[in-house]
Image (spheres, grey):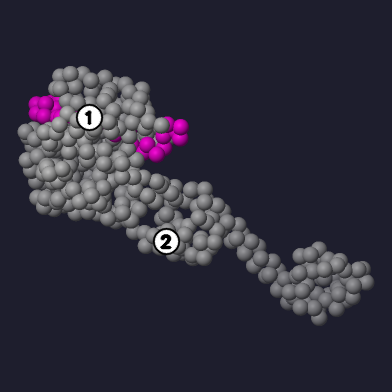
Amino acid sequence: MSKLTALQKQALLKGINQIPVSLIKRKIDAGEFTIDECIEHGLDSSKIEEIQLLEIEEASTKKKMEEDQDFYNKINNDEIIIQEIQRALIDGRVTEEGLLNNTEIDEELLKRILGYSKQFHPSENNDVPLVDGTDIFFFGKSESGKSCVLASIFTYAENQGIFVDNMVSIKGINYKNLLVRELKNGILPDATQASVDAVTYITTELHLDGEKNPLNFIEMSGEFFSAAAEDPSYWENTIDAHGYLSNSNKKLLFFIVDYNMYNEGEFNEATQDQEINLILSQLDLYEKALKNTYCIYIIVNKSDKFPEDVVDKNAFAKDFFIKNFKGVYKNLKIKQEKHGFELRSFHFSTGEFILKNSYLKSINSECPKTVIDSISKQAARRRSKGWFSKIFSTTEEL
């Protein structure tokens, strides 16, 4: 549209009160005349108020559009967790159509977001003795990813049909089933919510290659891990209340180190080093604990955060641990010489994450398979030498 001539402008201003407010607003926005010029030519106060309301409405709409776009950009840049998106949808701050048109979220993921529901799953003290079999302990600080590792292991085992539940530990089985159900829906378990005296015990049987191996999985909360490192009474009153450490079962110990936390400087590795060393010293107080341990494994968790140019992730995990946890490594070697257990390490990743690591897009099956294969080998102890070599190729000897 061509610009108004001076005569056209004057004609419009003289009849300003006969022009619809919407047209006046458009002319003002186009810079063809100003609100002050309209007022000078007698624009009615009611129309002035209407124009002001339109300006407020437009400013509000513009701000909303900018906020929406900022929200969409954060989603596309992996800066928003799934719960925030769900809340924004429920509150009406964004629409399903807006998400589908402006982000990488597709209809399937949108359904997952709308149906997302994380249940509270505390670690519970099962208060029952362990069955005869192989005891498998998971140690690690809060937020190290113990629950995610366990969820991955049990999900893989369920998909392969190689675990048969032993209902001796009902609470533990319920906890395990919840971990699997949520992981299959892309939901990551939170750090175990528990009091410091809570220990979860999950009993199952591994059926693999014609072998049946009873297994006892024992997980303690991160709070317990820290408290037990400092006070021996926690061991006597909880984890060993039914002989979990002093029984005659063979044992496998998994210590979980969170690579991502260390890499981002989210905790002081010296503190973790000290706590793991204290745990090892406490274990040594129980005559049968380390004596009956087949193998101690170091799991360097969240290996999906390793540098992109890393080819051999197990070798990288081994070097990372030895370099950054020298005190623990030396202590482990001393206790290995004393008790004769194997000492191995491997990397671990739960899978591919999106939405600021709050949603699991795809599950990694290789890492939990490494754990299951290692457990099977250690629990059976009747395999051929060739089979041993095959299993060892998936881990690194420390």
Left-right relation of 173 to 266? left
Percent of width and height locating residue 390:
24, 32
Residue at (55% x, 52% y) in the render:
73
> Residue 295 colored magenta?
yes
Position of residue 220 measured from the top left corner of the image (x, y, whole percent): 21, 40
Instruction: Label 2, secondary structure: give it.
Output: helix
Identify the image quadrant of the C terminus. Answer: top left
Q: Which mark is residue 389?
A: 1
What residue appears at the point 14 percent right and 46 percent down from the top-left corner? 207
Query: How many angstroms separate mark 1 from mark 2 (CA)?
Result: 42 Å
- The residue positioned 43% from the left and 49% from the top of the image is 354
Work out whether mark 1 precedes mark 2 in sequence or the reverse, and give the earlier one.
2
User: Which mark's residue is nearer the viewer, 1 or 2?
Assistant: 1
Residue 32, placed above or below residue 191: below
Q: Is residue 207 visible?
A: yes
Query: Mark on residue 108?
Result: 2
Residue contact at pointers 1 and 2, CB within 8 angstroms: no
Residue 338, placed above or below residue 42: above
Q: Amino acid at mark 1?
A: Ser
Q: Secondary structure at mark 1?
A: helix
Give the mark count.
2
Residue at 56% across, 53% down = 70
Camera-nearest residue between 12 and 380: 380
Span of residues in magenta: 284-310
Residue kind at label 2, given as amino acid type: Glu
271 relative to 81, above or below: above
Asked whether residue 193 appears in the rendered view, the answer is no
- Furthest-right residue in view? 7
Local crowd at mark 2 within 10 Å, few (<14), some, or many (≥20)? Answer: few
* Residue 277 placement (x, y as % from top left): 24, 25
* Relative to 251, 89 lies left or right: right
